[in-house]
Amino acid sequence: MEMEVRRIVVVVEEVEVARTAMVWALHNVLRYGDLVTLLHVFPATTAAGSKSRNRKKLRLLRLKGFQLALSFKDICIHSFPNTKIEIVVTEGDEEGSRITDLVRQIGASTLVAGLHDQSFLYRLAMAHKNIGNNFNCKVLAVKQPTSPLTSSGPTLSDSSTSMDFSQIEISSLSLFYSNLICTGNSSTKNSVSSMSRSISHYMEIKEKKKAMNKKAGLIL
């Protein structure tokens, strides 16, 4: 009996935790035959200015979003070469409604996103009682520990909103994987080493991507 093909949507953003979330999902959620959808929603262009200027800005945002998604795809292929991947880049809002609509249209079984101060998940949590029902799938939000010295701007505390999505704390995962390296069997150690290589590969891609964008003048 063949296993049902699951569609896993990964939200692509230009933040560190978004890539961390994808790497975590590749090693903890993905199974053989699953389809990974890399979804990037760039902000809608305003009506101010000429139409030609808006069209140019729209093209640049779409191109930048597609290149960003390609960098995520490179990480996927490096970790799991046979992974089925599709890329969706579209215009939308910052409140998450466009992402919600697309996830439902895709028929995703799981949504994976990096949780940061300006995350759309916080806004959705404030506007809706049940995020899971809104997406009609499991929602996994991967977060990294923040420090008072590194945080900037106002933040939304978890206690002020109803968090009905699963949050995974990366700091505990790091400790967990460190313990596995010391005590795990060879299969587990290989998995952990593979995850470490994925992160290292991502850092290399990030630096190359930054240099290419600077050279092409695509940094907006």
Image (cartoon, rainbow, N blue to C red):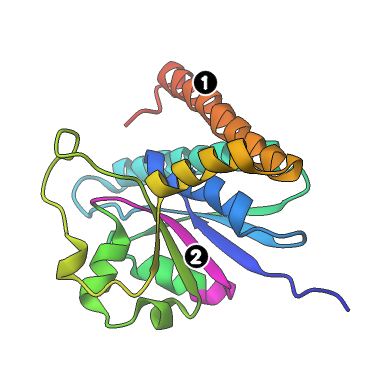
Q: How far apart are marks 2 and 1 (CA)?
A: 28 Å
Task: Give the residue type that dot 1 points to.
Answer: Lys
Q: Where is residue 207 in the image (x, y as percent from the top left)?
A: 48, 21
Q: Is residue 184 above or below residue 137?
A: above
Q: Is residue 147 above or below residue 111?
A: above
Q: Is residue 57 shown left or right of residue 32? A: left
Q: Tell me the SS state at disc 2.
A: strand
Residue with the mark numbered 2:
111
Q: Is residue 176 magenta?
A: no
The residue carrying pointer 1 sits among few (fewer than 14), some (14 to 19) or many (20 or more) residues within 10 Å by Cα, namely few
Q: Is residue 27 shown left or right of residue 101? A: right
| Foreground residue among 182 and 187 | 182
Q: Position of residue 186 (x, y in %)?
A: 75, 40
| Foreground residue among 216 and 40 | 40
Task: Give the residue type that dot 2 points to.
Answer: Leu
Tag count:
2
Q: In which quarter of the image is the N terminus?
A: bottom right
Q: Give the range drawn in magenta.
A: 104-117
Q: Tell me the SS state at disc 1.
A: helix
Q: In which quarter of the image is residue 194?
A: top right
**Picture disc at residue 208:** 1
Q: Does the magenta stretch include residue 105?
A: yes
Residue occupying the point 54% across, 33% down: 199
